[in-house]
Image: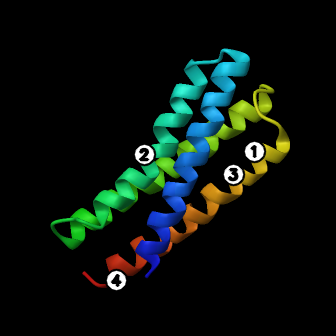
Amino acid sequence: MTENKLIILSKQFAIEIVRLCQTIKEDRGEKILVNQLIRSGTSIGANIHEGNYASSRMDFINKFQIALKECYETEYWLDILRETGYIKEIEHKKLYDECSKIRKLLATSITTAKKNI
C-alpha cells in the first residue's frame, strides 16, 4: 500500500518540479540550477517505480535508498533556489513539504523492508 502511495506522490511531485523548472527557465533564463533540480526531483519517482519491480528485496531496498538520497538532494536545490530568489517562499514550502513527506515514507519503507530480510 505504501509503495502505491509513494508512486502516486512521487509522480505528482515530479510533474510539479518539471512545471516549476519550465517556468524558471522561461521567466528567468536559469538553466544550471534548474537542470540539477529536475534531475534529482524526477529521479525520486523513477527509482521508486523501479524499486517496485525489483528482482530481490535487496534490490528493492537499494532503489528506495537511491530515491531517498535524491529526496535529500532535491531539498538542497529547492533551498538554493529559494535563497537565490528564483522561487518564492510559498513555492519552496509547498514543494519542500511534499518532498519531505515522500522522504519520510521512503525511510519507513526501507526500515520495514530491512526488518524482513
Which disc number belongs to residue 92?
A: 1
Corner quadrant of residue 77: top right
Circle 2: element type = helix
Marks 1 and 2, how far apart at CA: 19 Å
The reply to whether callout 4 and callout 2 are in contact (CB within 8 Å) is no
Residue 99, position as x, y percentages in the image: 61, 55
**Amino acid type, label 2:** Ser
Marks 3 and 1, how far apart at CA: 6 Å
Residue tagged by mark 3? 96
Residue tagged by mark 2? 43
Circle 4: element type = helix
- Residue visible at 65% across and 37% down? 20
Front in this rendered view, residue 70 or 92 = 92
- Residue visible at 22% across and 65% down? 54
Marks 2 and 3, how far apart at CA: 16 Å
Q: Which of marks 1 and 2 is nearer the N terminus?
A: 2
Nearest-to-viewer mark from 4 and 2:
2
**Amino acid type, label 3:** Tyr
- Residue visible at 42% across and 45% down? 43
Q: Which of marks 2 and 3 is nearer the N terminus?
A: 2
**Amino acid type, label 4:** Lys
Corner quadrant of residue 64: bottom left
